[in-house]
Each structure stands twice: as C-alpha cells, then as structure tokens.
Image (spheres, helix red, strand yellow):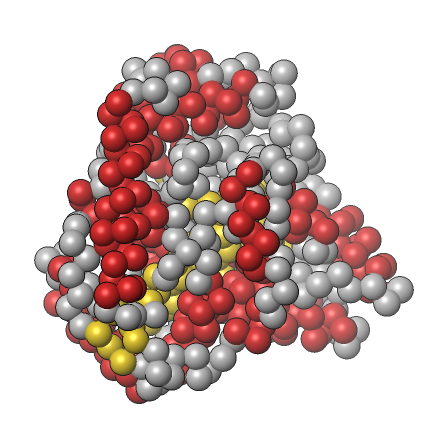
Amino acid sequence: MNDYLKALQKEWLEEATIRDMQHKMDAGELCAEDLVMMYLAAIAEKDPNIHAVLEVNPHALQIAKGLDEERRNGKVRSLLHGIPVLLKDNMDTADCMHTSCGSIALQHHYAQQDAFLVQKLREAGAVILGKSNMTEWANFMSDKMKNGWSSRGGQVNNPYGLFDVGGSSSGAAAAVAANLTAVSIGTETTGSIINPAVQNSLVGIKPTVGAISRTGIIPLSITQDTPGPLARTVEDATITFSLMIGQDEADSVTKSATRFVGIDWLARLDKDALIGKRIGVARSIFTREISSEREAQFREALRAIQKLDAEIVDDIELGTMEDDLGYNVLLYEFKAALNEYLDTSSPTNPIRHLGDLIEFNKEHPEETLKYGQVLLEKVERTSGTLTEPEYIEALLRNRHLAGEVALNRAFKEQRIDALVFPQDHGCSFSAAAGYPAITVPADFTIDGEPFGITFCGKAFSEPALIGYAYAFEQATRARRKPY
C-alpha cells in the first residue's frame, strides 16, 4: 500500500461514511480496490487485539477491481457500489469462505450458494470483505458462555475497553466500531443486533421479521430470526438495510416485504422526524436493572428527545415483563431449524444434525467445551417435530404477551408512536412479536463504556423509527471512535 493510501487510512478512512467513500470514488480520488486495501491493512493492524474478523475474502480485491471498471464505464449500481461489508459467520457465501457459526465443528464447511441477502448485497455492488466472529451458535450453546466467544475465533474484545462486547453479532459490531469495515450484517433472535450495537456505540437495525430473507443463514428460531445492519451512522445503516429488503420465494414470510416497495428510505432521514411524536417510556421494564449512572444518562436522552419537540409519555405499563416470555420457543425451534440447515448443507459436511455436533464437541472438549454445551444437550432432548404442547403453549403465549398485551395495547391505548428504552432493554418484546427496533449511540459512562437508546415500534414501522433515530443522532452527535 502506497504512502497516500496509508495516510488516507489513518486520517480519513476511520469514521468515513458510505457517502464520504462514494464522493471520493466519484471524484476519482480513490477506488473500491483502494478501500479494500485500506481495510485489509486496518484488519492486519488492529484485529489481533480485537478478534472480530474470522477470515477475509481472498477475492475481495478482484471483486473491487471489477466494480471499479463498472464505475469507469458509467455504471454505479447503488450507494453500496464498491463498499466493503463484513458478514456474520452464520451467513452462507458461495465462495472461498467458510460458514461455521463460530464453531470448529463447521470450520471446513463451504456453503453451496449465497444466502439470499448476500445475493442482494452483491447485486447492489457491495464487496463482501469477509466473515466476522460471533458468539458461537448464536449464544444458544451454553447458559454460561461469554458474549463474543467462539471455538473458531476466540474471544471478541470490545474496542472501547474491558467491557462486555455484546452478542451474538459480536465481531460484526466490534469490527465496525474499530473501523475495520464500512458496515456489517448481523442477525438477531433476541437482542443479538441491538445488544452489541449499544455496547459498541453503533446504530443497529433489527427489522420486522419478514423484511429481509433468512434463507441461507444458520438458524436459531424459525419465528424470531432476522438479519440486519450494524453501522456507525443511521444513514449508513439505512442505506444497507434498504438494499437487503426483498421477497424471497424460499422464505414465505418475506411476502410482507412488499409493504416497503416504493419507499424513499433516504427521505426518512429527517432532523424534524420527532416533532409532535408521542414517545413512550416503560420504566418498570428496566428501573431495577440499570445503574444510577445509566439512569441519569437515559434522562438526558429523554430531554434531548423532548428538545426535538416530541412528547414523552412516561411510566407506561406494558402488562408483562421480559422474563415472562422465557426461552422455550427457541429451545424447541432450534433443533428443527438447525437439523434442516445441516441436512441440506454440502454433502462434504460431516455434521448432519444436532447430535453430530454434540458428539463432535465431546470429542474435542479442550477446544469446544470451555463453557459446556448444556443448552445444545437440552435442545437435543426435544423431538425436533415442534409437536410438544409446551412449545405450542410457549409460542402462543409469547406472541400474545409481547404483541398484544405489551406492545399493541401500548401503541393503541397510549396513542404512542414508539417506545424508547435504555440500552437493549425491551428487546425481548420486539423479538417475540417480530417487531422492529433501532439502536442509536447516546453517551458514554465515566469509565468510557458506550451507552445507547433503542426505539421500538409496530410491525413495518422502520421508516418512522429510522427518522426518530436520525433526528436524535443529529441532535446529540454522541458517537466517538474508540481510539
């Protein structure tokens, strides 16, 4: 890498937005190949201390070069044209990279085709830079596992210091925070985008289930899984999110993605989006769980929202608590979903079902069982047929409690446009109901740990939530880089 690119990497690339990158590429000051080179250099320099990146795409430079040729010929596919993107290691790519969900049991597994969302990113002109580390098996392997640990990649560290890095999209978040990629794609079942976003001072969008296809993603829950972007700004997250939306015949729930057809997503980035909006606060969900310092930070965030001419509707009762939802839905759905994925994976993959995985871990205990596998073993004892009364009861109860008792009633009876929570509190409601949420940086503790707030809305309210997050972001400018 020449001296000019080295200087750009140090003085400009860090915290550069997608628009910043596009402006320089349009002006001929750099190209996509340069961007890939600079990010590869950043990964080589910083990632030995962070462990956010499992592997890089050996074809990334060649892909970027081809996209640069398109630009020279007057073709720019989208705002992601030539932009490097990292993928969480549970997303299939039909290339030289592996898909392992962080497990050495799948460290040699090559997917046979791209995940649907990966196809969408490639069509948009994104450069798939590599795979990010994650909490192994989406943190459903052991009840003792530390966020960000995997047998394949080790422990992901928070770039801001000795703080929880969040999970399970741990590496995806840490890599963006440390400026090792422009944006990354994570997945969420219950908090796995929102939680690492707040812990790494990022914007994270957890979409309505059905907005983005799950085909080609190693699953945890049939009813709750959804992919979404992690970025340093609301605009970058919005650009990336908008280009992954689409109907996939292999994932029937995405038929609802047609609701977003025709939306001008960038027009939703409105500094005045909160004017006249009623934003609810459900204090009983988090009051006993946050420190006095974070409670004070949340009060300041609410004042900032009020200064944007929104009305705070305080102390709303949701009628249930997050603990009331439990995890039985995931306990039963995991086996059915994972066995289907493994059974249809490449014929060369020796791990064909959950039982094979458990046995592999028992045969390699030093590498795989640092935190045990009590959850995997508990899941294996289910039938995998989803016929258990306990599963049906949990599914119906959770959807009712989260969707009707907690969220829908609050939106209707209190006439609120969204709920806002400190950090990732309340994420279980959005998860069980399949509703969207967006996290935005808000502050840092006295020790330097990131603090964020999360807006939650009704199904398919992403256009509004993005506006609220953008207005807050532009008014507070709370994010700062870790170095």
Residue at screen point 47% across, 16% down = 353
**Camera-nearest residue between 156 and 145:** 145
**Camera-nearest residue between 134 and 254:** 254
Q: Is residue 111 left or right of residue 381?
A: right
On-image quarter of the N terminus: bottom right
**Camera-nearest residue between 70 and 274:** 274
Q: Is residue 8 left or right of residue 378?
A: right
Q: How many marks?
A: 0
Residue at screen point 67% across, 28% down = 112
| Residue 107: percent from left, percent from top | 53, 27
Q: Can see residue 256?
A: yes
**Camera-nearest residue between 126 and 1:** 126
| Residue 441: percent from left, percent from top | 37, 68
Residue at screen point 63% across, 74% down = 20
Q: Is residue 225 left or right of residue 32?
A: left
Residue 7 placement: quadrant: bottom right
In the image, farthest residue toward the front: 413
| Residue 56: percent from left, percent from top | 61, 44
Q: Is residue 73 left or right of residue 102?
A: right
Residue 360 placement: quadrant: top left
| Residue 57: percent from left, percent from top | 66, 43
The vertical placement of 73 against 429, above or below, is: below
The vertical placement of 332 against 477, above or below, is: above
Residue at screen point 50% across, 55% down = 229
